[in-house]
Image (cartoon, rainbow, N blue to C red):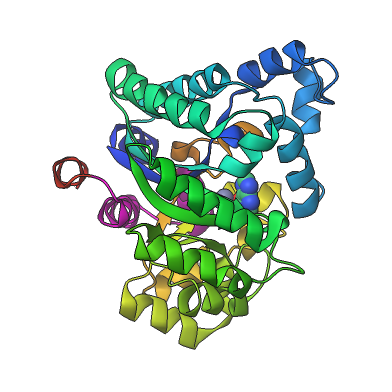
Amino acid sequence: SSVAAFVAALPKVELHLHLVGSASLDTVLALARHHPDGGVPTDRDELRRFYTFTDFPHFLTVYHRVNLLVTTGADVVTLLDGLAGELATRNVRYAEVQVTPVRNRMAGISYADLAAALADGRTLARERHGVQLGWVFDADATLGPAGAEETVDFAIGHRPEGTVGIGLGGPEVGVHRADFAPAFRRAVAAGLHSVPHAGETVGPDEVWAAVTELRAERIGHGIGAAGDPRLMEHLAEHGIPLEVCPISNLRTAAVPDIAAHPLPTLVAAGVPVTLATDDPGMFHTDLDAEYLICHEAFGMGVPELAEIARTGARAAYCSRELRDEVL
Ligand code: HPA
Ligand code: ZN
């Protein structure tokens, strides 16, 4: 359709995707064959089925399994090379990549090796693919406040070029955003942007906590905000954008079906919304597909989709030159 052609040609930014979750099927198959005892299928069809998630906790267990296959700095560079290549084919000029350093350390990568791999991968993305990358170092809520402190130690101590923010992923059930306030306070004091996940699988309370306790400047997912008009008003008034990932929400069953997705409610309330893929390799998606599902399911046309792309460019922690090029 003409909308598909418009989206494909549109220069875009992507503000929410995870390093390990971005790995293509081919990349993960190669890693799985290299670590045959890792519990990840080495057959393509089986890997596809492995990426069928019953719910969000199930998704996280699969993600951790794949994470443990990424054991060297060279693996990280391979992931970034593949990711930048995919982004370039979708006309994505700038992306912020969520990297979970404590999980990489648990897979056997030293922090020095990780920092060096990110530097190499970032150069390669720019020079080989014409894609700029920024880093969000995200804590995994599963690992508690101590894991978040270790994440901030890495982000501040190594501060690889392109570091833009501190994040928080993992579960929201049984663990609260507010528990991570001290780590976020330290990161923000060191000049990092606060961009936690919140309201992915739960309601507005955790989004409020992200805003008030973690000083969130942007929020990963945040779709739980749709249940609270006062919160949506707050996000709109303070210009706190949501990185909405509709296909992720379908794959993890965070929403039951696309008709039930709150994106139109958020947009109607004036909340700044941008689109992202979250874990494109695992969710079988790409950024164009996220735009197109909004066209097909919500009737959004070229003007509405262009506004979503501009919202992303305005919310990106990239250079002014790059932002102007995309705007
Ligand atoms: N949410 C929380 N944790 C994650 C995600 C997500 O969308 N992707 C990878 N880890
Ligand atoms: Zn995410």
In the picture, measured across the screen, residue 118 lies left or right of residue 312, that is: right
Q: How many marks?
A: 0
Kindly give the residue lying farthest to the bottom in the view shown: 230
16 magenta-colored: no
Q: Residue at x 64, y 63 (%)?
A: 145
303 magenta-colored: yes
In the picture, measured across the screen, residue 307 lies left or right of residue 153, that is: left
Residue 272, percent across and down? 36, 66
Residue 216, percent across and down? 43, 68
Residue 162, percent across and down? 33, 39
Q: Is residue 256 above or below residue 124?
A: below
Q: Residue at x 61, y 18 (%)?
A: 27
Say whether residue 283 is visible.
no
Q: Quadrant of residue 257?
A: bottom right
Query: Taken as a whole, is the magenta stretch helix, strand or loop?
Result: helix
Question: Which residues fall within the magenta stretch?
Answer: 292-318
